[in-house]
Image (cartoon, rainbow, N blue to C red):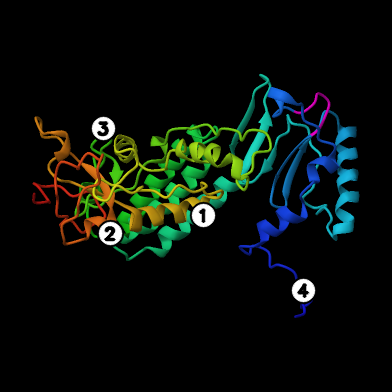
Amino acid sequence: MGFTPTTDGVPQGGVISPLILNIALHGLEEAAGVRYRGGIHADDVVPGSPAVSRYADDLVACCQTRQQAEQVKARLAAWLAPRGLAFNEAKTRIVHLTEGFEFLGFNLRRYRDGKLLIKPSTTAIKEFRKRLAREFRTLRGANVAAVLAKIVPIVRGWVAYYRTVVSSKVFAALGNYLWKLTYKWACWTHSNKPKRWIVQRHYGKFDKFRADRWVFGDRATGAYLPNPAWTDIVRHTLVKGGASVDDPDLTRYWAQRRRKVKPPLDSYTVRLLSSQDGRCTLCGQDLLTVEDPPQTPQGWEWWYLWVTKKAIAADYLVHHDQPGRSRDQRTHLVHAHCSRRNHPVRAAAGTVMSKRSPTALAACLGRMRGNALVRS
């Protein structure tokens, strides 16, 4: 058995590319001169030591002085050379933190009051707005259901990626921009209709938990476009020291960390997930697979598409707002494939449905209204 020489390398953007880079660049922190304190302060760098953050082939080195930054760059250049790698001088800069810099779609800058704020970068915002405008132009002639199916995952994915930083004002501005795009699309679609008719047809109070009657949605199905300004800001929790997901001794730590990550779903669905301990009330299995959260806006977009199409469905057993109903008759979240089954499913022990033996008749992914959808 022989080996074939690989002279072409890994294509940029390939699925294996980040792994190859992590292997090739292992030890970069030590080469830059980063030193950590020991004991209970193992997460902190030694005073005067540079700090390096890296994601695949993108890295940032935070130094005390410009001279130290130039020294770190020289050391890293010497460390990369034997590996056939070098800095891209066009993208490599040494700047003061008060000027700010962009990294992975974020802008990091220390302001006059001394606060270090991390925000979505101007470049990322402009590119996202261009994409939304392009998608709405492409959707001219489509119905409102097709518009929502295309736009909602894109918006939720982008918002989920930036919800851990200072994004409230950005989300509010994005919500106003989305409203203009939807109104422009509606006026183009119904060019022969008066504005009042257009508003009554496509806008309303679709979210029953919010007093906003200017939400764009589909009156036939109840689906709607969520306002990015509704998103709660959830700060990112730093990983302890050099903890690795591949360390078998830290399996419990990573499992607990993943459970604390709130999915980018509406607050009502998140409350249902919490009340059910994240389990399907029909089969008792986890509704959402416990995996590492996506690391890009596109990753969150694909995650949301997977959840809405394959993972969960809101199964309305009875009207959720009828008083006097017992807990086992209220709204629950179930797997989409569980709700599509036409044979009796035994409820898992310990779930809120364990006292009943339901037959799921629902077969849609949206929230269904009406009287009982199951028979006991």
Compared to 355, does 364 lie above or below?
A: below
Mark 4 lies on residue: 6
Q: Residue furthest bottom?
A: 1
Quickly name the residue at label 1: 298
Of the numbered discs 4 and 2, the one sitting upstream in the chain is 4
Marked residue nearer the N-terminal end (2 or 1): 1
C-alpha gap between disc 1 and disc 3: 31 Å
Residue 247 visible to the viewer: yes
The Cα atoms of the two marked residues, 1 and 4, are separated by 30 Å
Q: Quadrant of the N terminus?
A: bottom right
Q: Which residue position holds label 2?
A: 337
Q: Residue at x 22, y 39 (%)?
A: 352
| Residue stretch rendered in magenta on the structure | 45-50
Gap in angstroms between the C-alphas marked 2 and 3: 33 Å
**Residue 207 coordinates in the image, percent (x, y):** 26, 40
Q: At label 2, which amino acid type do we have?
A: His
Point out the tag, 3 or 4, that comes first from the N-terminus. 4
Foreground pick, 315 / 290? 290
